[in-house]
Image: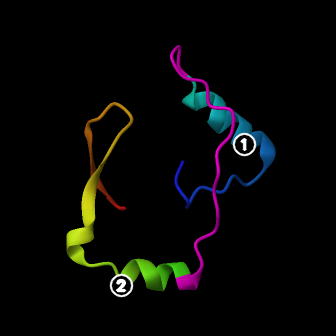
Amino acid sequence: MDGAHTPPNKRTGHRRRQALNTTRRTVRYTVGWTITPEDERAIARLPEAAWETSLRQDGEVQEGYFVAE
């Protein structure tokens, strides 16, 4: 889960975690937070060259989503 994920309640969060489980992976918890206006300003200052296309868990390109490290 990314920082934008904040479950509306614990039951929904539990179901989402269960959906992430596979025979090779068990997700016990996720961490999320609210992105603040200060966070948004910091993200906006990142140079274009900092961004890369994100990948899904299976390693395939996730079109329309980007990450910066």
Secondary structure under badge 2? loop
Is residue 25 one of those drawn in magenta? Answer: yes
- Category of crowding for the residue at label 1, using alpha-carbon neighbours closer than 10 angstroms: few (below 14), some (14–19), many (at least 20): few
Q: Residue at x 64, y 63 (%)?
A: 33
Decide which of 46, 55 is in the foreground and name it: 46
Q: Quadrant of the C terminus?
A: bottom left
Q: Residue at x 22, y 75 (%)?
A: 48
Taking 46 as reference, is 58 above or below it?
above
Q: Quadrant of residue 51?
A: bottom left
20 relative to 10 in the view: left or right: left
Residue 67, how many percent across, how many down?
A: 34, 59
Q: Main secondary structure of the magenta part?
A: loop
- Category of crowding for the residue at label 2, using alpha-carbon neighbours closer than 10 angstroms: few (below 14), some (14–19), many (at least 20): few
Residue 55, how many percent across, how many down?
A: 31, 44
Q: Residue at x 53, y 20 (%)?
A: 22
User: Which mark is drawn over residue 23?
Assistant: none
In the rendered structure, which amino acid carries the disc numbered 2? Arg
Residue range highlighted in magenta: 22-38
Taking 49 as reference, is 5 above or below it?
above
Mark 2, residue position: 45
Secondary structure under badge 1? helix
Mark 1, residue position: 12
Residue 31, how many percent across, how many down?
A: 65, 51
In the rendered structure, which amino acid carries the disc numbered 1? Thr
Real-space Cα separation, disc 1 to disc 2, in angstroms: 34 Å
